[in-house]
Amino acid sequence: MTLEVIELSTKEQRVSFECWKEYKRATSKFPTFLSDREGFDILDEEVQELKQAIRHGTPQEARAEAIQVAAMALRLLLDCYTLPLEKETNE
């Protein structure tokens, strides 16, 4: 498997960093998802909090919740759906 290098704008880099930072915070605080159903329930809870923040909160609160949604989506992928990496060949 060859990994593609992509260029990110400064804004994209900042948001990506914040999402990964939240992911790392969550993984250090809470155990690995035991199943994809558990992961989905947690992700759904975060989506509901984002919905409330969008409807009744400030833009800053909505942004913080959106970062948590992204982090939990990453966690669901990494805890439950990570494919094994193939060894790279030098062809």
Image: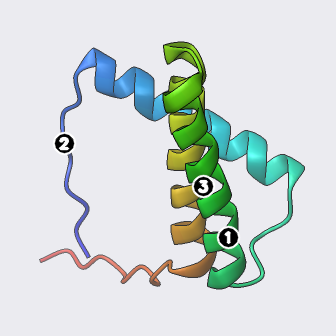
Q: Amino acid at mark 2?
A: Ile
Colouring mode (rainbow / by chain / secondary structure / one colour): rainbow
Crowding around mark 2 (Cα neighbors within 10 Å: few <14, some 14 to 19, many 20+) is few
Asked if 39 appears above or below 13 in the picture, the reply is: below
Q: Position of residue 60 (x, y in %)?
A: 55, 15
In the picture of the structure, the residue carrying the numbered disc 1 is 41
The answer to which of marks 1 and 2 sits earlier in the sequence is 2
Q: Nearer the viewer, residue 9 or 63?
A: 63
Q: Is residue 86 visible?
A: yes
In the picture of the structure, the residue carrying the numbered disc 3 is 72
Q: Position of residue 26 (x, y in %)?
A: 76, 47
Q: Amino acid at mark 1?
A: Asp
Q: Is residue 20 visible?
A: no
Q: Position of residue 64 (x, y in %)?
A: 59, 27
> Label 1 to label 2, Cα distance in Å?
32 Å
Circle 2: element type? loop
Q: Nearer the viewer, residue 4 or 35?
A: 35
**Residue at x 77% of width, y 53% of height:** 27
The answer to which of marks 2 and 3 sits earlier in the sequence is 2
In the picture of the structure, the residue carrying the numbered disc 2 is 6
Instruction: Quadrant for residue 11, please give it.
Output: top left
Q: Nearer the viewer, mark 3 or mark 1?
A: 1
Q: Nearer the viewer, residue 2 or 79?
A: 79
Circle 1: element type? helix
> Label 2 to label 3, Cα distance in Å?
23 Å
Q: Are marks 2 and 3 in contact (CB under 8 Å)?
A: no
Left/right of residue 39 with respect to residue 9 in the rendered view: right
Instruction: Quadrant for residue 12, please give it.
Output: top left
Asked if 26 appears above or below 39 in the picture, the reply is: above
**Residue at x 51% of width, y 69% of height:** 77
**Residue at x 42% of width, y 27% of height:** 15
